[in-house]
């Protein structure tokens, strides 16, 4: 990565919440760099720390209960976490915007839509009142809300329209960095498609850097250049979209893909990840994923932190036994059929959930074509055993 | 053998301050024993109301409901009690559908107790059996719902629904609140139970990949009406209704090398209050023409593939490849109007676009643009100014949220939802 282009750099971020005497370890050492104009998708399950990471960037976390224990967040080379109040406000005004999941609660019910967008502009730019109103109306029309609705209130708008207003507000000041936290989760798919289209056009126009938080891998596939998979407050896999979707390497990433109904086309049973995400108060020692991992070996369970390995340039994975074969994850409605049964050469793979893969795995994996989870029976990702695939 | 559930012309209307809300409007279909029907559509399309009306959580306004061949449209208290043992509901939100003051054991025990079928000792065993069946650990027997995570709560909801051996369960978005890995566990559980007990399921969801996985048949609803009904693979291979095409194309694909060809719809769902008689999708439809202002009937255009779209119907009839049998209706009234315009011949060939979608992008013409048979149709969709047509209806739409799209016309990327930005799918 070209260091001069780095727009946002997060280093060893650790965030905790205190609640009733317990410490909740929400973010446990997250680092990533993002180039100007690129989009990063943060994926993971509920409680993995996705939202906390995003909210740490403009320092929107309420403290207490939240506490940024350590870390650095550089935006254009300046550490946000060290900034004074005035400077921080300035950054929030001019450089960073955030879209929240729920448009219903993000708008003020007692203000008209137009006034809310105008307020953003009034606080952030020095313009005459007339110009502000004109700019607000233009912003709204950009997201498809006509001028005649300028003086209406949020309750007169549907969910999709409210989210469009929120998007208009977020983009009104042409932020350099847009943080979108599940921006479309509350919306129907047809409206979701509209919203993502708006965001993507705005990005093209203003060269906005985007962090998109979602649990929907399809949205990431279509909108993000780089992907970070988060588990128990750590980025367990990071890489380009192609790295993650063509060569998912961490067993958790693989498990996520295998849980998708669209992945299991032609198969009756789905392959969920066994067990549950860990309680963020008591994160397992060693690799946090080991209690659910089909490959966990003794080394994964001991106290040492699993090193972040660079599998190929720019593709990082926190796993002692990453998948290194040619795995292709395809899905969706593109008429995909599993052309080969997964795990064709299974016998060479590990026999059970508690044995680490042998060295042969990699070699075997290379022979298996796309569609196959090289060298590993899918059963391993189901609840129990490592019986070989029929 | 009678179908497990059959509904005929089912309607459920709600009175609201500004008129009548047509939540379910004239819906007819059957669910065969041991199969799963998926009901998909956007929020507010009436899918939950349909499920709830069938199991008598809501009383229907009109129409008939049959369960195992028996008419269950009107039930007295005693009959309702017996019916409820046979039909059950699994809710979307296990957080609010379980009594917070009851333990897991009590929640599952309650229906068993109320049925008075079992003695106390057998009751205990039955609860244990149900917990095993749904994969709830024994240690959680005395736990309260707030101590459980979403997946386990949903298992408790499923155990409770299964308690009295129902033969039909309505699952209303049972996995929508769950993470994918947990969602997969619950879907597997439901499929296993169905395999073992021959249960019939009605699966209501907005998640198309889930519904594709679990359903034998899929019904697509739009504003209270069923617009398409087909076997799952038929529907995914070939969508005949423009709404279904747009809905399926809107689902983000995880295949980065083969992204889905998106059909962006204009606007949003219009209001189901006092709807006009014609096709309810008209204000968003890329192919809307004046025939769409006539009522649309669900017709069987291919064996087992029902569509409520006069355009799709006439296209297929023009090809001569459809067997045409009305479904629950007489011969559709929609075509009656055309004779007045005297161009049925052209109509038969209208389009020539496959229903496969994507065609709407060639804007500037009527939907028939460049087609040899279009005749007078050329101007129909072109600008769609309603007053041009002597159709006998008042078509000025009330002002809805999607106010910009009162003019049905060909899909025009410039007019599309995100106005300034909507260059179709050219990203």
Image: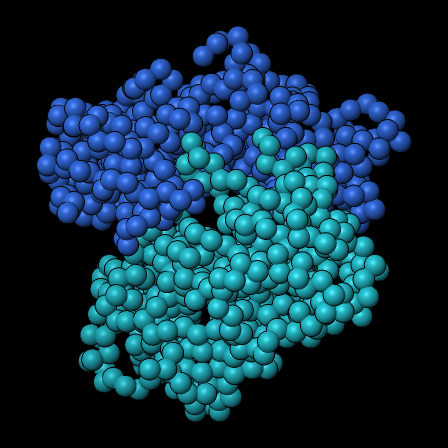
Chain colours: A blue, B cyan
The residue at 49%/64% (across/down) is B322
State the image coordinates of residue A163 (x, y, percent, origin top left). Answer: 64, 44
Q: Is residue A131 left or right of residue B378?
A: right
State the image coordinates of residue A145 (x, y, percent, origin top left). Answer: 75, 43
Q: Quadrant of residue A31?
A: top left
Quarter containing the N terminus of chain B? bottom left
The residue at 55%/66% (across/down) is B226
Above or below residue A379? Residue A123 is: above
Q: Using the image as rendered, state which of residue B377 and residue B21 is in the foreground.
A: B377
Q: Is residue A255 left or right of residue B314?
A: left
Q: Is residue B150 left or right of residue B327?
A: left
Residue A165 showing in the rendered view: no
Q: Using the image as rendered, state which of residue B188 and residue B32 is in the foreground.
A: B32
State the image coordinates of residue B93 (x, y, percent, origin top left). Answer: 46, 60
Residue B391 showing in the rendered view: yes
How many discs mark residues in the rendered view?
Answer: 0
Above or below residue A97? Residue B57 is: below
Q: Using the image as rendered, state which of residue B226 and residue A232 is in the foreground.
A: B226
The residue at 66%/62% (across/down) is B345
Quarter containing the C terminus of chain B? top right
State the image coordinates of residue A243 (x, y, percent, origin top left). Answer: 37, 25
The residue at 72%/54% (across/down) is B375
Q: Quadrant of residue B212?
A: bottom left
């Amino acid at each position: 990565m070209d260091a001069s282009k780095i727009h946002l750099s997060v280093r060893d971020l650790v965030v905790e919440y205190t609640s009733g005497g317990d410490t909740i370890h929400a973010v446990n050492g997250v680092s990533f760099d993002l180039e100007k104009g690129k989009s990063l998708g943060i994926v993971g399950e509920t409680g993995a720390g996705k939202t906390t990471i995003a909210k740490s960037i403009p320092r929107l976390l309420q403290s207490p209960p939240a506490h940024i224990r350590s870390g650095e967040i550089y935006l254009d080379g300046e550490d946000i976490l060290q900034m004074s109040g005035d400077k921080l406000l300035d950054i929030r005004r001019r450089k960073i915007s955030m879209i929240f999941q729920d448009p219903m609660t993000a708008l003020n019910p007692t203000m008209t839509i137009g006034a809310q967008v105008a307020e953003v502009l009034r606080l952030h730019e020095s313009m005459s009142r007339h110009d502000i109103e004109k700019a607000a109306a233009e912003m709204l029309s950009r997201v498809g809300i006509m001028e005649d609705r300028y003086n209406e209130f949020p309750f007169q708008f549907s969910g999709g329209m409210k989210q469009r207003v929120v998007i208009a507000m977020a983009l009104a000041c042409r932020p350099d960095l847009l943080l979108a936290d599940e921006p479309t989760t509350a919306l129907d798919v047809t409206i979701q498609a509209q919203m993502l289209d708006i965001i993507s056009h705005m990005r093209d126009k203003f060269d906005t850097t985007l962090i998109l938080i979602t649990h929907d891998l399809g949205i990431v596939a279509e909108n993000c250049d780089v992907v970070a998979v988060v588990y128990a407050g750590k980025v367990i896999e990071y890489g380009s979209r192609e790295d993650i979707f063509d060569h998912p390497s961490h067993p958790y990433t693989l498990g996520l893909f295998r849980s998708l109904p669209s992945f299991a086309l032609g198969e009756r049973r789905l392959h969920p990840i066994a067990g549950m995400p860990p309680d963020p108060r008591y994160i397992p020692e060693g690799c946090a994923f080991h209690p659910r991992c089909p490959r966990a070996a003794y080394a994964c369970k001991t106290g040492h932190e699993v090193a972040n390995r660079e599998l190929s340039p720019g593709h990082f994975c926190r796993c002692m036994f990453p998948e290194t074969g040619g795995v292709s994850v395809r899905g969706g409605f593109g008429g995909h059929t599993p052309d080969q049964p997964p795990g064709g050469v299974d016998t060479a793979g590990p026999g059970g959930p508690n044995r680490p893969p042998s060295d042969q795995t990699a070699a075997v994996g290379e022979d298996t074509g796309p569609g196959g989870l090289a060298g590993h029976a899918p059963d391993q990702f189901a609840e129990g055993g490592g019986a070989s695939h029929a | 053998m009678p179908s497990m559930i059959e509904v005929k012309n089912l309607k459920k209307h709600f009175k609201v301050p500004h008129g009548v809300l047509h939540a379910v409007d004239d819906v007819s279909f059957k669910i065969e024993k041991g199969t799963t029907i998926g009901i998909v559509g956007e929020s507010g399309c009436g899918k939950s109301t349909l499920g709830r009306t069938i199991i008598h959580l809501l009383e229907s306004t009109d129409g008939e409901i049959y369960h195992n061949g028996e008419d269950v449209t009107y039930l007295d208290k005693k009959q309702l009690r017996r019916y409820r043992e046979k039909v059950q509901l699994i809710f979307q939100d296990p957080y609010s559908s379980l009594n917070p003051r009851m333990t897991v054991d009590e929640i599952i025990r309650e229906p068993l107790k109320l049925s008075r079928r079992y003695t106390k000792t057998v009751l205990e065993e039955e609860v244990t059996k149900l917990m095993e069946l749904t994969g709830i650990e024994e240690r959680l027997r005395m736990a309260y719902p707030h101590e459980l995570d979403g997946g386990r709560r949903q298992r408790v909801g499923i155990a409770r629904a299964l308690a009295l051996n129902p033969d039909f369960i309505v699952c209303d978005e049972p996995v929508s609140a769950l993470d994918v890995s947990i969602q997969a566990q619950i879907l597997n559980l439901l499929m296993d139970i169905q395999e073992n007990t021959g249960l019939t399921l009605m699966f209501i969801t907005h998640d198309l990949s889930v519904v594709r996985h679990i359903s034998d048949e899929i019904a697509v609803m739009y504003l209270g009406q069923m617009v398409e009904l087909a076997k799952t693979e038929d529907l995914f291979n070939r969508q005949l209704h423009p709404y279904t095409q747009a809905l399926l194309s809107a689902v983000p694909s995880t295949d980065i090398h083969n992204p889905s060809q998106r059909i962006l719809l204009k606007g949003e769902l219009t209001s189901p209050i006092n709807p006009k008689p014609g096709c309810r999708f008209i204000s968003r439809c890329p192919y809307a023409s004046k025939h769409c202002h006539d009522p649309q009937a669900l017709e069987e255009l291919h064996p087992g593939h029902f569509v409520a779209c006069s355009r799709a119907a006439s296209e297929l009839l023009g090809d001569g490849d459809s067997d045409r049998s009305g479904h629950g209706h007489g011969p559709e009234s929609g075509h009656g109007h055309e004779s007045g315009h005297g161009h049925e011949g052209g109509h038969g060939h209208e389009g020539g676009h496959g229903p496969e979608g994507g065609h709407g992008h060639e804007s500037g013409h009527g939907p028939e643009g460049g087609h040899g048979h279009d005749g007078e149709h050329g101007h129909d969709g072109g600008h769609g100014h309603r007053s041009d047509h002597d159709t006998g209806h008042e078509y000025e739409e009330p002002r809805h949220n999607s106010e910009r799209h009162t003019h049905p016309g060909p899909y025009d990327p410039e007019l599309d939802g995100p106005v300034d930005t909507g260059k179709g799918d050219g990203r």
